[in-house]
Every structure is written in C-alpha cells, then in structure tokens.
Image: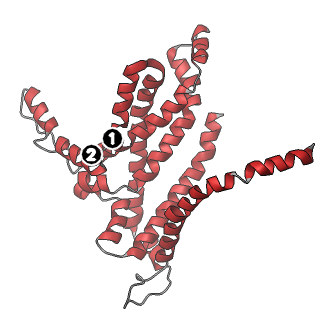
Amino acid sequence: MADRASPGRKGGIVPALPLLAPAYLWLTVAIFLPLSAMAFFSFMTDMPLAGRNWAFTLENYAAFFSRDLYISLLGASLRLGLEVTLWCAVIGFPAAYVLAKVLKGRAREAIFLLVILPFWSNGLVRIFSWAMVLRSGGFVDRAVQAVAPFPVEFDLMFSYPAVVIGLVHSYVPYMVLTCYLTLQAIDDSLLEAARSLGASRMQVLRRLVLPLALPGLTAGAVLIFVPVVGAFMEPRILGGRTGTFYGTVIEDQFVAVFNWPLGAALSFILLAVVLAILAVSAPISRRAAS
C-alpha cells in the first residue's frame, strides 16, 4: 500500500513545481540578485566605473564601528521604529477589534475603506499633506487660533513628533489589517462562554483576546518595524534638521555623496541588526502565545 501511495505523492509534487517557478524566479530577480550586487559593492573601495580603480576592502564596515555618529543614528532609528510600532499597536488594535467584533454590514465596509485609504495614495502626497497640516499657519494652527481665547501658535513641522505622526499614518493600516484577520478568526462563542462564566470585559481581553490575537500583533509589528527603521522620506521632509536618522544617511551615500560602497555596507549592517532583533524576539513571542 505504501508503494502504491508514493507515486501519487510524487505526482502531486511534480505539477506544483511549474506553479512555484514564477514566484521563485521573481524572488531571485527582484531580491537575491540586487542583494548580491549590494553585498559586492559593500566590499569595494570605489564604484566599478570606467576610469576608476577599485579593490576589495573592509574599510566600509570598519567605518561604522569607528564613528560614533553611525552608531548613535542607528540607535535613534531603532528607537523611532519601536515608538512608531507601539503607537500603531495602540491605535490599530482597538480599531481592528471594532471592525472584527462590533461593526457589521455597511458600517464595517465604510470604516475598512477609510483604514486602507492610505494605500491608494502616493507616499509623497501623504507626507506633504501632513506638512500642510502641521506647519505654522496650517489647518490645525488656524483651528486652534479660532477657538483659543488667547494667541497660540501650533507648529510641529521639522520636529520629532511630526516624523512619528507621518510614519504612524503611513503604517498603521498594516497593524489594523493583521489584527483584523486574527480577531475575526476568534470564535464569538469563546467570548460569550467566558462572559457567562463571570469574566469581566478586561479579563476577557487580557486572558483570551490578546493571547489569541498575538500572532496578528506580531506580524503587524514586524511589517511596521522593519521599514520604519530604514525610513528616510518622512524624516527628511517632516523632520528637517531633526530628521537625520540612519536611513537618511544611507540615502545620502547613494544620492548625494555617490559613495555606494559605504551606503551598501551601512545597509547590510542595518539588515543584520534587524534580523538579529527579530531572531531574539521570535522565541519570546512564541512563548507568550503558548
């Protein structure tokens, strides 16, 4: 019987290979080849262009450890990623809970449409929209002056809070979507059973809803933390001089200074740090979920 079943299993695997080939081809072309080129550039003294002499070196990686500026900027970017992820969880989880367990019908569809609306607009449009709102003389400043009994100037442009606001607005839909999927999968009968046994709403939330929704929170945190650590558009436009982070330094190396080897090395150091953080936090998340 085992011999008869094995050809069937093989027959089921072979037809799947052509279906998987486009995905793996795309991953190779769009991810592995550019990463390989970046890794190659990170060990070079100069760009391999006509008329330029180059050689292999480790000075680009040594520059990160020899300059305190890079280390401090990396720490600031990690702090920014943690703060933005925390605010996205604080805002996104209650919104996802309302969408999954409270609203029904067209009300849910309307709110869900508003949540995913930032995905339909260009990133620069969102950032410059916040610049119009947060600057002196903007919409919020005029609204505050209209209701305040004394002159008040509201200007958050070129500040750290403006960067956080812009990043939270850009990435909170990821938290809402991932938490919504996990919360919607929770059977309502479990919540009703807990309440019928005398559990309060806070006990149900703390002992039942949060542990079951932890995979969605973790997935949303990863989707937000990883790109925010290397973000450069929001810090550059909304932060001004205070928006200098690790990602903006990497952008400068590629765009302004044209020092691609150093930019590639800094990028791979950031990638290694993020992967190390994810590797350390993964067992903790699994232990908390169990």
Location of mark 2 (residue): 126
Q: Quadrant of residue 252?
A: bottom left
Which sits earlier in the primary sequence, circle 2 or circle 1? 1
Instruction: Report the quarter where the N terminus lies.
Output: top right
- Determine the residue positioned at 59% across, 50% down: 280
18 with respect to 123 (left or right): right
Observer-nearest of 235 and 99: 99
Q: Position of residue 114 (x, y in %)?
A: 33, 32
User: Which structural element holds mark 2?
Assistant: helix
User: How far apart in space, not on screen, are marks 2 and 1 (Cα)?
Assistant: 8 Å
The answer to whether 52 is drawn above or below residue 112 in the figure is below
Q: Position of residue 77 (x, y in %)?
A: 39, 55
Observer-nearest of 236 and 281: 236
CA neighbours of label 1 inside 10 A, class few (<14), some (14 to 19), many (20+): some
The answer to whether 123 is drawn above or below residue 179 in the figure is below
Q: Is residue 148 visible?
A: no
Q: Position of residue 172 (x, y in %)?
A: 39, 39
What is the image's colouring?
secondary structure
Q: Are marks 2 and 1 in contact (CB under 8 Å)?
A: yes
Q: Position of residue 165 (x, y in %)?
A: 30, 42
Name the amino acid type tagged 2. Arg
User: Which structural element holds mark 1?
Assistant: helix
Q: Quadrant of residue 108?
A: top left
Location of mark 1 (residue): 118
- Determine the residue positioned at 39% across, 66% down: 70
36 with respect to 255 (left or right): right
37 with respect to 242 (left or right): right
